Amino acid sequence: MTDTTPPAAPPFTLPKYPGGTGAGPRPSAALTPKGFLARNPSVLWFLLALAVLTVAVTILSPAFGMGSMSTSFVKTLGKTLCLCLAALAMDIVWGYTGILSLGHMAFFALGGYMIGQWLMYARTEEIVVQSLATSPIPATAQEIAQGVGTQIFGVVGGSDIPLIWSFAHSLPAQLALVVLVPGLLAFLFGWLAFRSRVTGVYLSILTQAMTLALSLYLFQNDSGLRGNNGLSGLQNLPGLAETSQDLLSIWFFWASAAALALAYILLAWAISGKFGSVLRAIRDDEARVRFLGYPVEGYKLFVFVITAVICGLAGALYYPQAGIINPAELAPIASIYLAVWVAIGGRGRLYGSVIGAAFVSLLSSWFTGGRAPSIPLGFYTIDWVDWWQVLLGLSFVGVTLWAPKGIGGLFDRFRGLRTPDRKGAPLGPDEGSLQEQEAVE
Amino acid sequence: MSALLEVSGVSVSFDGFKAINNLSFSIGPSELRAIIGPNGAGKTTFMDIVTGKTKPNSGSVTWGEKGQSLLTMSEAAIARAGVGRKFQRPTVFEDQTVAENLVLALKSPRSPFAALLFALTGEGRRRVEALAAQVGLTDALPRKAGELSHGQKQWLEIAMLLAQEPLLLLVDEPAAGMTLAERELTTAMLVEIAKTRAVVVVEHDMEFVRRLDCRVTVLHEGSVLAEGTLDHVTKIPSVIEVYLGRG
Amino acid sequence: MRAFLLGLALACLGLSAHAETVAQIVATHAADIEKPSRTTIGPVISDLAASGDPMAARLLEAWGNKQLGERKSDKTFFLLSPDPAGYALTDLTGAPAGTAAKSDITELKPNAGVRGLIASALVQFTLSDPDPAKRANALTSIAQDPNAESLAPLRAAIDGETDPTLKAQKQRLERLLTLRFDADTTARVTAMESFGADTGLDLRAALTPLVATSRMASAGPLEGKNIAREIKPGRDLTAVEAYDLLVADGSAPARITHEDQEKALADHIQSGSVAGFPVSDLSIQANRDRAYTALEAAGQVPPAATDDEVAAAITAHRFYEVYTEADRVITDAATAALGKISLKVGVLQVADLGLDGLSLAAIYFLAAIGLAITFGVMGVINMAHGEFITLGAYTGYVVQQIVPGYTASLLVAFPLAFAITFAAGVAMERLVIRHLYKRPLETLLATFGISIALQQLFKNIFGTQARPLTSPDWLGGALTFNDVVSISYIRIAIIVLAALFLGFFLYLMKRTRLGLEVRAVTQNPAMAASMGINPDRINMLTFGLGSGIAGIAGVAIGLFAKVTSELGTDYIVQSFMTVVVGGVGNIWGALAGATMIGSLQKAIEWLNPSNTLAAQTYMILFIILFIQVRPRGIIALRGRAAGD
């Protein structure tokens, strides 16, 4: 960045604006620095709610409490927290910066793949070493590698361990990759896309294409990640074969809750200050921000990469709870659902995205799980397994049309907040390009 | 006095249409200049070139004492170098408070990391308060910019421009949609600002330009037709023809 | 052998004047027939073949099948067929001659050599059969199983051929056999060269075996072999393959598998060590090899190659690819001929690929044009566009259930699909999109909501299995130019359909009031509105039109793809890509985008034919890079109108 420092501008005085107060400069409360929590009242409430949930789940869990909650439900809740984390990231990139990325679930899945490599490799290695231990001659490294290779890649007709598994034996290396792989991919893609000023709908389509390309690539058997079989058995932690899933599930729930809490605090901090102000300004009118001297592309890239990394981490926590990951997980539709959650929850507010992700994904699994009661109409019975998608699609249209603020908008009503009546002035998000056009005419 | 901005031999065309044709222009470090010209004379395109929005097909644009070329710089870099631009329609961030708008514009490091760690220090705060007071928006600081009246938005934008502390200010038709009193005030303000930095005003309104009492550059079909005082240029036959002949 | 056959064939040519009956010939050569040998029987067979008696073929056939016998009582020959009494007899004029007990008959059992002669004589019979269909069959069977024996009879059968098509086929087949089986090298080379750059599959099939190679290993220089090239282990063949070659020709002992080696070592553990190596050291392969070699030296295990020995053996040898055909002249000529052919085949393949790409481009054009128009005019991306395509395809399916006759049903389906999707588009515009103008990202998501709802609705109505949309018979088959270039009629029809729509749109946009208004709204909506154009109406009609074309595209796509609820999804991303690459708001942009995407996809598939998934991946990567060069597409609006 060429930041040429201009020579210091000489001071000047201006004539007074007659309609003003005329009292000269005086301190304003609007500029008084406020505490973090004062600026972000939602953080306290959010942390409180999360803590209550965590305690409740712990008490009800089979591992520590009464066991009236099944292990699989603990896992479902833990997974939901991870989805909420991804939705937080999506909210930053879309709700605050105005980039409708249809690729963030791809980063999520990549994070899952990276941790999955270690889980699967290390676990398989354990099993292979165990089975070779009965031989009187100690096993060679090649024999172990051969055994692991056959175990993992037998389904795709191979036994050699591909190059991309080079670090699979090492947890720290794969953890680094959980951050690096989504981060680098986001950096590369974002750099190319933002540099050529691809914005709006174009950018959305391009991110969708990127996601599709990635998932098609992973669907191949020779991608090195077991093609459409994906990685499986991820619920078994290497070295913890004796630990029960009851215990593991609550551990992962705690970890997910902690990650969500941490991310919420960090992101709330980041967007409550000037950084958030710049992001919202970019969303509303990026050309104007550019003329203020801000490197808009740099900001977008920064946000894109950071949120991709958050998604990667969320995926790394999600898939050990899900147990299996395959390329279908990063089909473009998954990323679109992420956008749907954020929109239904209410974008542009962190708690909105969390509520949306939790609400819609839990509702979705309730309906598609066949537990929702069917509605008999006499001539036809509405079976929710078949009709839930229709309902979701239509309710999504409804939210976009009539409740653009989503569920989060309800909170404004409770607090008596009203949107300022702008008398026909353009409404916040997505208007940037329009204003930009007008500005140069 | 060496020039602050030197535009020489610049041409740009859109699909064969020459919007700017071999234009040359220069302005000193503290000078007020008005650019007039009929519609399609290339005034806006000229500002686009200087601010880096449009890249010319040929010619050079140099800046400052070191003669740095603006053509290789991005819009943001040019803005950081000290070129401020005010659009015809007020463009402020309506979804943010007046205070946030001013803090955004306030001269400070612009990188994402700097923005993350930014804190409004005492001096910056005083500067924002001073600017708000100068444009009469002190009470409006906590309000959203979208709630302001049209005139107030104009003032907010001017305050934002000043907060940027530019060395060169490009102002596009500042008088449009203003009351007579506001115009007078604007004139006074522009004259005052031009004492310490360069100001280029693009304007249709001859009365307004007359009040500015400064050198005038007449653009026509993408090139400079005449330059001098308003009285001088309005006596040149070709200028009269361009204005009267084309209505 | 070949020389003999050649002689036989030449003899045959001159013998057509003979007018003896089969019975007479057999009577003359009775002794030779009783005890046939390859040297003596030749003339008999040729006499029989040349006799012109229809019984000759039957006799030869029976003889070859060991169904010719001699009655012991009168030394007369009969054709035999199984009968409860022993054999039913047929005499040499073809008349039934009663039965005989098995003991009364001496069956003639000609040896394999004689049977071979008989078989080739029979070939000549069928090749000269009066029935052209039988002659054609004979040619086909020779072409399917070419062998040296067929060459002579084939040559003999050329001159007598009256049918010009069959004659040409015979001549071609003769040259194909000559180049493979002729004894004379010059004749073979001449035959090869006579084809030039003919691209027939039969020629390629005939030439390929001539350049077949096998791998050989040799410790020193390889003498007396027709070497194609030297190959290096690790580059041209794996070390394992190289060593297997050495094992196969006996110049190295078989490799020991790791399992066997481990077992052998385990069997010889003595107080915690094997041949002096502590067991704990044996977790390294090199140590295991050393231990095994030590056991080998002690004679405790059979000699076998361990990894290090294998490596040494491979370095000590050189490896070659050797032509099966020993004659260098032949292999060179065949290589040259194949080279010429492959060049021409390459050119033709590119042409074929071009046709494929064109038809794919036509499909993408049809699928994307509606999208391009709505995006251009309204700045709206319709994510449900793919579902409109599906809707069109299902309309076609339903119509086919009701309207009998595939042609008639198609004629109904196209306009109906247009009408239905047009109505759906207008409804969507009125109910949803109208309220979301100037919020393009929200439109994207709202239309996506409609997309998932529609998709599930299709599933609920039509089920998940594929529904057939059958094309009429006249669209079956393919237009074949030669062995390489061909295009199916369905694809031609789609290209024609796309061309029709291109014409229709050009007319609509340039020559009608609606087109003028649409262009005005595209370029400057505010100005158009102030000129009295009702943008609401234009938007509605444009959206309807764009959706209607999606319906038409759906019917067309349904004709060759499976109609499922996910049909549209398969095409939607490509359609988006087409719009992005082509440029917005311009019909030529959509065309350019479709052409580029279509031909690119085919080209990548051609380079990597085994993997269509990878092809799509690379194509998308290419598009992302392409956007770097031309962010606004191939045909972009420039200047201030572009709004950038």
Image (cartoon, rainbow, N blue to C red):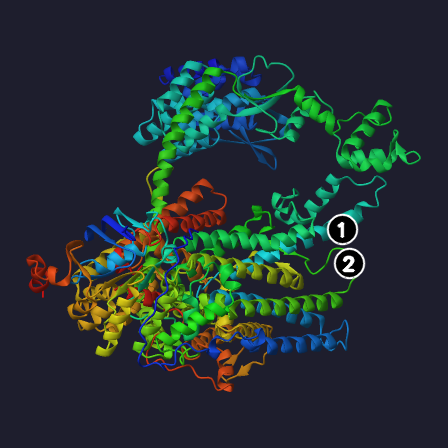
Residue C304 location (% of width, % of height):
77, 26
Visible residue check, residue C491: no
Chain letter belonging to callout 1: A
Q: What residue type is labelled 2?
A: Ala
- Secondary element at tag 2: loop
Quadrant in which residue A37 is drawn: bottom right
**10 Å crowding of disc 1: few (<14), some (14-19), many (20+):** some
Residue C1 location (% of width, % of height):
51, 15
Point 22% across, 57% down: residue: C506
> How many numbered markers are drawn?
2
Point 61% across, 60% down: residue: A313
Report how far apart the C-alphas of labels 1 and 2 lie in the structure. 10 Å
Residue receiving disc 1: A126
Q: What residue type is labelled 1?
A: Glu
Picture quarter with the C terminus of chain C: bottom left
**10 Å crowding of disc 2: few (<14), some (14-19), many (20+):** few
Horizontally, is A326 left or right of A150 in the view? left
Q: Is residue A402 above or below residue A190?
A: below
Sooner in the amino-acid sequence: mark 1 or mark 2? 1
In the rendered image, residues at marks 1 and 2 fall on the same chain: yes
Horizontally, is A169 left or right of C586 in the view? right
**Do the residues bearing badges 1 and 2 touch, measured as CB atoms within 8 Å?**
yes
The residue lying toward the viewer, choosing from A145 and A312, is: A312
Residue C401 location (% of width, % of height):
39, 67
Residue A241: which disc? 2
The residue lying toward the viewer, choosing from C265 and A62, is: A62
Chain letter belonging to callout 2: A
